[in-house]
Structures are given as C-alpha cells and as structure tokens.
Amino acid sequence: EVQVLESGGGLVQPGGSLRLSCAASGFTFSDYAMSWVRQAPGKGLEWVSGIDGSGGDTHYADSVKGRFTISRDSSKNTLYLLMNTLRAEDTAVYYCAKNPYPYCGGWFDSWGQGTLVTVSS
Amino acid sequence: EIVMTQSPATLSVSPGERGTLSCRASQSVSTNLAWYQQKPGQAPRLLIYGASTRATGIPARFSGSGSGTEFTLTISSLRSEDFAVYYCQQYNNWPKTFGQGTKVEIK
C-alpha cells in the first residue's frame, strides 16, 4: 500500500525557516516524481513544487521561487521541502503527493495527511 | 498561468439525485485534467485523471467528461459519503493549477 507521511510543520516567525519531510513507503520511491501542494486555512489547493524521480528536475510556483527548495533522498525514501524567508501567506497545511510518472508532469495519485505550517509572530 | 474556474460554488443535492459539477479552463488543457474529492479534515483523494479515467477503487457512479476548456464531473446517484468539496486540476501547463472547488452539500 502506498503511504506518504509528512512531518516538520510548526509555528515559525516571519522571516524564519522550516524543513518539511515526507517519508514514503509501498512503492519504489525513485520511480516516481513527487510534489508539495498546500492549502491555506479555509482555502483551496495550491501546487507548490515538484521534483522528478532522479532529483535532477525541479519546478516551483512563482509564489515560492527563490525561497523554497525541494529535494529527495532515495536512500531514505524521503522528500523534503526547505522553506526560507517565510511569510504569513505561507501559512497552510502542506501535503506531500505522489505523481504517476518518473517525470514531473501529471496528476497526484496519492496524498499524505498533511503538516500544518503557521507563520506568525 | 491557466485559471481554472469551477461552478457552482455550492451544489445542494438530495441523496440519490444526480450531481453535475463544471470546470472551465482559461485556455485549452486538452484532456490533461484531474478531479479530486476532499472531506473535512482529510487529504484530497484522486477521483479522475485524463478527464475521464477513474482512479483505482473509485466507484462507477463518478464519471468525468470534456476536453479543451470545458469539463464535467457527474455523480450519478449521490450517497451520504459523497458530500464533500471537489476540485479540478490541470496538468497541461506549468504551473499546475486547481479550481477553487465546488462544495456538494445535502439538500
């Protein structure tokens, strides 16, 4: 059974940093691209970033480009999102999602339960 | 950026009735469109990809149609567990974008 489990969320001050992790199991991690999608409180879904199966191709939403860095460690079956220079508008539940292919295109076929990031002083 | 617009914002339906949800793209996305269901406090769940292909384990009462800029998700006979928020998402162009959601509520 495919499972992805996020961790690392919490309360951080504006301008601070946080690293999210997503532990994957039940599939060959390096065979699939992975993504982060966020949802602000009471709002809809926003794609944040994606990375291909090899880790060599990454994509970012304009709203986070230059501040967030996506990476993966296939030896640990883990996806990461390093978030720097956090702003109040980054407050959201962050979901880890699996793509259906090794490359970054396509939909999201499995989702974690999410981890809440709150940016506030 | 492709803007996805869903209608209606809220759909009030009685159990057993048909529910029809719409999604419009600001430019053509071919059939590169997915639908997701999200219940309160839960993660989204993939229902449909490729505009009309049901994901694994999704009941046949869910069907998707459309291409280009106009898409429809139909729930043929609503059950209590189907009352939720539904999102469409295009993956034809970067960035991948979602609609704002349609809430399906009990009438």
Image (tube, coloured by chain):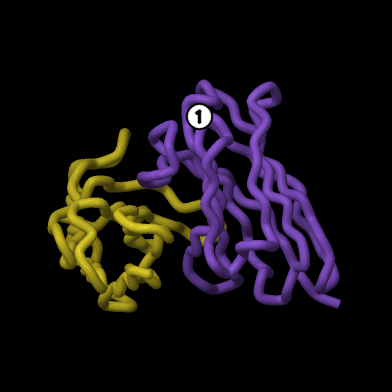
Chain colours: A purple, B yellow
Q: Amino acid at mark 1?
A: Val
Task: Report if residue A120 is visible in the image.
Answer: yes
- With B58 as the anchor, is A43 left or right in this view? right
Number of numbered discs present? 1
Residue ID at (30%, 74%): B5
Q: Is residue B42 visible?
A: no
Residue closest to the eye, A114 or B20: A114
Helix, strand or loop at label 1? It is loop
Q: Is residue A93 above or below residue A51?
A: below
Task: Kindly identify which chain the residue marked by label 1 belongs to.
Answer: A
Q: Identify the residue at image location x=30%, y=39%.
A: B55
Please give the name of the residue rendered at 27% of the width and 47% of the height, measured from the top-left corner.
B48
The C terminus of chain B: image quadrant: bottom left
Q: Nearer the viewer, residue B43 or B5?
A: B5
A17 horizontally vs B78: left or right: right
**Is A101 situated left or right of A78 in this image?**
left
Judging by the rendered image, the residue that carries numbered circle 1 is A2
Residue at image position (75%, 54%) is A9
Q: Is residue B24 above or below residue A52?
A: below
* Within-10-Å neighbours for mark 1: few <14, some 14–19, many 20+: few
Give the percent coordinates (x, y) of residue A60. 54, 57
In the displayed structure, would residue A74 be above or below residue B84?
A: above
